[in-house]
Amino acid sequence: MAFCAYSVSYGDYMASRDIAALMITGLLGTVMIILAVLLLSGKGAFLIAGYNTMSKEEKAKYDEKALCRFMGKILLPIGILTPAVALGGMYGLDWIGGVYAAAVTALVVFALVYCNTGNRFKK
């Protein structure tokens, strides 16, 4: 017995909520993939935190294209995996969120260590 003129069943609510989550994560993933492609092309250094705040003299010491390509390689899998969180929620695979968080954390830690050791991007 419904107390209002319009009622939404739980199943309909879940479907609309899941679709909204998939749209949002899909949009975020698409934006990350677009930025990754920009970085993979060797452009978009202004997107790299720390590098964009350096003076021109400091920037001249670094291989900008190699740094951009590396950051693009880090961002691309994150963008591809982002919608998987919503898909996991839709299909009751809650562990996918944990795997996604672990993958992003591992990629970020790897990128920080790789970029800050060995002078890999110095000219």
Image (cartoon, rainbow, N blue to C red):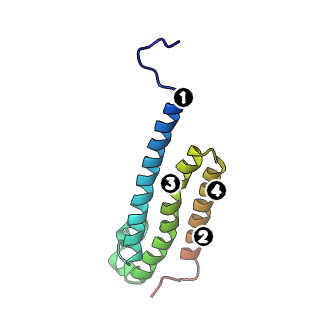
Of badges 1 and 3, the one in the foreground is: 1
Q: How many numbered tags mark residues here?
A: 4
Task: For the residues labelled 1 and 2, say whether their Cβ atoms are less than 8 Å apart.
Answer: no
Residue that sits furthest to the left in the current view: 56
Badge 4 density bin: few <14, some 14–19, many ≥20, Cα 10 Å: some
Badge 1 density bin: few <14, some 14–19, many ≥20, Cα 10 Å: few
Lower position in the chain sequence, tag 1 or tag 2: 1
* Mark 2: amino acid: Phe
Badge 3 density bin: few <14, some 14–19, many ≥20, Cα 10 Å: many
Kindly identify the residue that appears in the image at 44 percent across and 77 percent down. 69
Residue 107: quadrant of the picture = bottom right
Q: Name the residue under label 2.
A: 110
Residue 122 in percent (x, y) is at 47, 84
Q: Distance between the residues labelled 1 and 2?
A: 42 Å
Residue that sits furthest to the front in the current view: 1
Q: Mark 1 points at which residue?
A: 10
Residue that sits furthest to the bottom in the current view: 123
Residue 5 in percent (x, y) is at 41, 15
For the C terminus, give its image quadrant.
bottom left
For label 3, the SS is helix
Lower position in the chain sequence, tag 4 or tag 2: 4
* Mark 4: amino acid: Val
Kindly identify the residue that appears in the image at 46 percent across and 37 percent down. 16
Q: Mark 3 points at which residue?
A: 83
Q: How far apart are marks 1 and 3 (CA)?
A: 23 Å
Numbered mark located on residue 36 in the image: none
Badge 2 density bin: few <14, some 14–19, many ≥20, Cα 10 Å: few
Q: Name the residue under label 4.
A: 99
